[in-house]
């Protein structure tokens, strides 16, 4: 066989599959954009739809923030893509996000990806109203303070040169969430049982955002198996609550309130729905607060001047004295800690635990010169909206003082959205605010620390976390400012 024949054969071997692949990608793109509403004169947003069926899910899962930044640079604040089995438009920027969030029930509705609905349940995120958390914050304080103080004592007494902060904070936040949100008492779970629950929860979260394929060893399959372990323990707790007439601990936890809310509406308690709601409460009250608390340790470890300003505020409120002279920590005192609150806000601005929220278009809507067809998914980006907000100057700088001066409500309302916004802002945000403030107070007056690897590299999967788990050396605070 001559050289020409060999070359022709090689071209056929490699070129034909490539051409078929490119043709399949083109046909897939045409199929996806055929969902455009012809009655609307506006074009679809720019963007690409990725691979047949898979879309751009794999790139997004593997690259996360790098993938999203590349998309933003290439296509701007609105672009189309295909994620988690659905055509999707990703939206960022205060004005664009404002349009989406204020269009709840009129233009859009909450709809998480199919994998999330399968694992967490098809119902909307928690029937427990945020206001019910507001009126019970005072009951949270002693429980949170007890758990945080005990945890920090362990950290200070830990053997070895360093502690991996992120896993430790996740265990702490899990214990707090189990007690406050679900009413578990410290005696209800052995260390081994608690560790099994933590591991099951982490496995479920890792596979929460995956392709909707339920086959052995798939992400969805592993997520459902982990979810079943959690549901079994929660069901045991729910049945114990049903058997008791009065709640333990002197206050009603969020799950108890949810049960009473259901019965108060004349509805029968549905065990599966209660288990799903309890799992959602844990998701909102554990993973996100663990992420935020870890970021707080990182930022305060890198900015000792900010930590010192927190301590000066605590000192001014009588919270940095000897234990016998310290003022009792309660909601009134916590609400007076304005600078500490700004530190938490700045942490959530630079490192929001949840990168975005999911909606579905109830009808074809027009946004900034583009159409979003009815039935398409809409993701509003929290992290990108913070990054591009005109409200903030020197955006990459950690500067809590930027929140000390109140901003005009209209301009700041959708420039800073760590808990989402509109009618469906995060149901656990009141719980999170109290928890993070108590955590910051106890940390600042108990510990000094050093980040052993310097500034951490953060990753999203789906919650923001440090790749190296934030190895840190803790020592007791000397009391000197």
Image: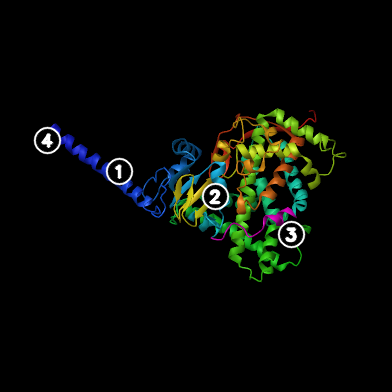
Label 1: state its secondary structure: helix
Q: Is residue 9 left or right of residue 431?
A: left
Give the mark, 1 or 2, whose residue is nearer the N terminus: 1
Q: Is residue 276 left or right of residue 366?
A: right
Decide: few, some or many residues near mark 4? Use Cα within 10 Å; few <14, some 14-19, many ≥20: few
Q: Nearer the viewer, residue 282 or 171?
A: 282
Give the mark, 4 or 3, whose residue is nearer the N terminus: 4
Q: Is residue 21 left or right of residue 423?
A: left
Query: What percent of the width, then of the height, locates residue 79?
Result: 45, 43
Mark 4, residue position: 1
Residue 22 — which label? 1
Query: What percent of the width, then of the height, locates residue 374?
Result: 45, 56
Mark 3, residue position: 252
Residue 300 occupies which quadrant of the picture? top right
Q: Nearer the viewer, mark 2 or mark 3?
A: 2
Q: How far separated are the C-alphas under marks 1 and 3?
A: 59 Å
Colour approach in the figure: rainbow
How many badges with numbers are in the image?
4
- Part of the protein shown in magenta: 122-135
Q: How far separated are the C-alphas under marks 1 and 2?
A: 35 Å
Residue 323 — which label? none
Q: How far separated are the C-alphas under marks 4 and 2?
A: 65 Å
Q: Nearer the viewer, mark 4 or mark 2?
A: 2
Q: Nearer the viewer, mark 1 or mark 3?
A: 1
Mark 2, residue position: 100
């Amino acid at each position: 066989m001559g050289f020409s024949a060999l070359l022709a054969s090689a071209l056929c071997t490699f070129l034909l599959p490539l051409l078929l692949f490119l043709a399949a990608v083109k046909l897939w793109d045409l199929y996806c954009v055929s969902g455009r509403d012809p009655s609307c004169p506006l074009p679809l947003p720019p963007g690409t739809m990725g691979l047949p069926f898979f879309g751009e899910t794999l790139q997004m899962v593997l690259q996360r923030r790098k993938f999203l930044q590349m998309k933003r640079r290439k296509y701007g604040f609105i672009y189309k893509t295909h994620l988690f089995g659905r055509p999707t438009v990703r939206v960022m920027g205060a004005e664009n996000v404002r349009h989406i969030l204020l269009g709840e029930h009129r233009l859009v509705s909450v709809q998480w990806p199919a994998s999330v609905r399968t694992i967490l349940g098809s119902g909307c995120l928690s029937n427990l109203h945020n206001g019910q958390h507001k009126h019970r914050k005072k009951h949270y304080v002693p429980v949170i303070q007890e758990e945080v103080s005990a945890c920090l004592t362990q950290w200070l007494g830990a053997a070895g040169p360093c502690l991996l902060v992120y896993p430790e904070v996740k265990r702490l936040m899990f214990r707090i969430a189990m007690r406050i949100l679900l009413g578990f008492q410290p005696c209800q779970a052995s260390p081994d049982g608690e560790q099994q629950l933590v591991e099951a929860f982490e496995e479920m979260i890792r596979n929460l955002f995956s392709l909707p394929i339920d086959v052995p060893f798939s992400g969805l399959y592993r997520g459902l198996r982990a979810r079943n372990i959690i549901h079994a323990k929660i069901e045991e707790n729910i049945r114990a609550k049903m058997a008791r007439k009065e709640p333990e601990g002197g206050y009603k936890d969020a799950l108890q309130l949810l049960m009473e809310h259901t019965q108060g509406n004349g509805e029968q308690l549905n065990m599966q729905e209660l288990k799903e709601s309890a799992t959602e409460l844990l998701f909102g009250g554990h993973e996100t607060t663990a992420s935020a608390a870890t970021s707080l340790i990182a930022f305060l470890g890198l900015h000792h001047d900010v930590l010192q300003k927190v301590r000066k505020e605590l000192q001014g409120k009588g919270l940095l004295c000897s234990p016998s002279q310290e003022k009792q920590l309660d909601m009134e005192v916590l609400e007076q800690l304005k600078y500490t609150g700004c530190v938490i806000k700045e942490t959530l601005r630079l490192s929001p635990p949840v990168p975005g929220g999911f909606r579905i278009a109830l009808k074809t809507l027009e946004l900034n010169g583009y159409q979003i067809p009815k039935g398409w998914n809409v993701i509003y980006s929290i992290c990108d909206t913070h990054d591009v907000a005109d409200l903030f100057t020197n955006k990459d700088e950690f500067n809590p003082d930027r929140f000390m001066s109140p901003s005009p409500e209209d301009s700041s309302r959708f420039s800073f959205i760590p808990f989402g916004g509109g009618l469906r802002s995060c149901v656990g945000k009141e719980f999170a605010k109290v928890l993070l403030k108590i955590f910051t107070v106890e940390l600042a007056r108990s510990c000094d620390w050093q980040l052993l690897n310097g500034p951490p590299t953060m990753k999203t999967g789906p919650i923001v976390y440090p790749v190296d788990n934030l190895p840190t050396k803790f020592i007791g605070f000397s009391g000197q400012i």
